Image: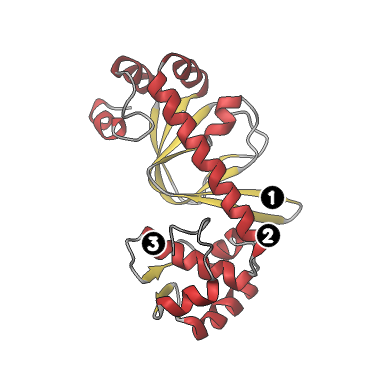
Amino acid sequence: MRAGERPEIAQLPLFAEMNEDQRERVFAASLLQVFPPQLTLFDVGQKPDFLFVLVDGLVELFTSNADRDSTLAIVEPVTSFILAALVTDQPFLMAARTLKPSRVMLIPADLLRDVIKQDSALMQQAMRELAIGYRNMVRALTDMKLRQSTERLGNFLLLESHRHNGDRNLQLRGEKKLLASLLGMTPENLSRALSALSKHGVSVDGPNIEITDHDALVKFARPDPFLDKYIS
């Protein structure tokens, strides 16, 4: 990593509060690389040689069985992935590929495990990221088990609006089949669900989606007052 890139990376939540000497030790051994779209960063079953930190771009975490792929998460900057495999020194349970040109920091796994033991601030932030990942998994599993596909899509759109400061004009990240895979749907079911949501305050024009009646969408999707309080 070039010296001029270090101040930007030092502001990432994972590193912001850690000991400066330890941070420089990590940075000196790390790489910052730009990858093209549709490049596989790692596969299921590989042991983690690095912690990946997405600085710019978009990354899909997915898994496969036979001829089927399923999107498990879409990683946006700035965040690390997959910390759990690195901390436990276990093989990846997911694969990762870039969805568009992405700038990724690669931190040697052995070094980071050693520094986590020595730096309490880094340890606390690592624990926080792992906890957030677990809670997001519980939310996603609850969403999949308790909601019909059209309700899942409605809640997803409400969440996206919240994440973009209440903006009701949304643009899909990637192709529609990526969103379908993320929500556990086929592309055909996604198209039908989008059509059904037109009766509940949603307008679709290609990759552009507008929430035209927020209250109507909330009434249909029925966000849970606890699990979905961030989109109510």
Task: State the image coordinates of residue 107 (x, y, percent, origin top left).
Answer: 44, 27
Which amino acid is tagged 1? Ser
Which residue is pictured at 63% across the width and 69% down the height?
Answer: 149
- Secondary structure type for disc 1: strand
Disc nearest the viewer among 2 and 1? 2
- Residue 162, numbered label: 3
- Residue 64, numbered label: 1
Tell me how far mark 1 sits from mark 3, CA to CA.
31 Å
Task: State the image coordinates of residue 1 (x, y, percent, origin top left).
Answer: 33, 27
For label 2, the residue is 145
Task: State the image coordinates of residue 104 (x, y, percent, origin top left).
Answer: 41, 38
Task: State the image coordinates of residue 16 (x, y, percent, origin top left).
Answer: 31, 29
Tell me how far mark 3 sits from mark 2, CA to CA.
23 Å
Spot the residue most to the right.
66
- The disc, 1 or 3, on the residue closer to the chain's N-terminal end is 1
Give the vertical position of 202 relative to 174 (above or below): below
Query: 88 or 102, which is in the foreground?
Result: 88
Give the vertical position of 190 relative to 132 (above or below): below
Residue 199 shown left or right of residue 168 in the figure: right
For the C terminus, the quadrant is bottom left
- Secondary structure type for disc 3: helix
